[in-house]
Amino acid sequence: MQTANDNITAITSTEFDSALKPENDELDSASKAEKDVEAEKCLSIITLLSEDEKEKAARTSYKYLVASTSATSKDGDNSEKPPPPSTEERDKYAMAMARRHLRAENGNEKKALQKMRNTIEYRDKMKIDVIRQCFTKNESDFTPPPEEEEEYQYHIDNLAPNLLEGKLFVRGYSKDDRALYITRTYLFEAFSN
C-alpha cells in the first residue's frame, strides 16, 4: 500500500529527473544522486509542516491558488466547478516551495524550514493571497471566504483610485494567466524627491 509520502517521492523524482540533462552517464548518475538527496531533504521539510502550513505553502503557486479557490462556488451558482486539488497535488506544490528555500539556504534543511515558515507567516499577515485574487479575469473564478470578504473589498477599494489615476495599472495577463500589475512609482509622493 502506498502512503502519501510515497506519492510525494514519486512526484519529486519525476520533476527532478526532467530538470537538467547532463551530457554523459557519469554526470547523469552524480546529478541524479544530488537530485535524490535534494528531494529527500525537501520531503523531510514538508513532513515537519502542519496541514495548514502545507496548504499555504502550496498556495505560493498561482496555479494551485486558482485551482483551490475556484473549486468553491458562489451561492446560487449552479455551474459545475472542478474538484479541489488532491493532497498529492498540494504536497507537490509545497515541495516546490521547500525546494526554493532549500536551494536558497545551500542545502541547510533547518534554515530552509525556518525561512519557509517565516514566509508563510508573512504571506498570511500581508494577505498576499487576497491581493493576488483582486484581479481575476472573471468574478465567478473566485469567491473570497466570508472571513476575508471585507479584506478583499478593502484592497479593491484602495487599489481602484490608484488604478484610475494611472499610478498603478493591470496590463493584460501573462502566459500563466496571471494579471500583470504595473506600478509607476514616480507618480507617488512618497517616491518623489
Image (spheres, grey):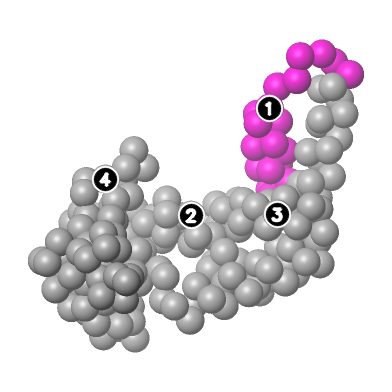
Q: Amino acid at mark 3?
A: Ala
Depth-wise, is mark 2 or mark 4 nearer the camera? 4
Disc ID at residue 173:
4
- Looking at the rendering, the stretch of residues picked out in magenta corresponds to 6-26
| As drawn, 145 above or below 18 | below
Residue 183 image-quadrant placement? bottom left
Circles 3, 2 touching at the beta carbon (< 8 Å): no
Residue closest to the far top: 24
Residue drawn 65% across and 73% down? 117
Residue behind mark 3: 104
- Cα separation, mark 2 vs mark 4, equals 16 Å
Front one among 96 and 10 = 96
Circles 1, 4 touching at the beta carbon (< 8 Å): no
Q: Residues within 10 Å of mark 1 (few under 14, many from 20)?
A: few
Circles 4, 3 touching at the beta carbon (< 8 Å): no
Depth-wise, is mark 1 or mark 3 nearer the camera? 3
Circles 1, 3 touching at the beta carbon (< 8 Å): no
Residue behind mark 2: 61
Residue drawn 81% across and 22% down? 28
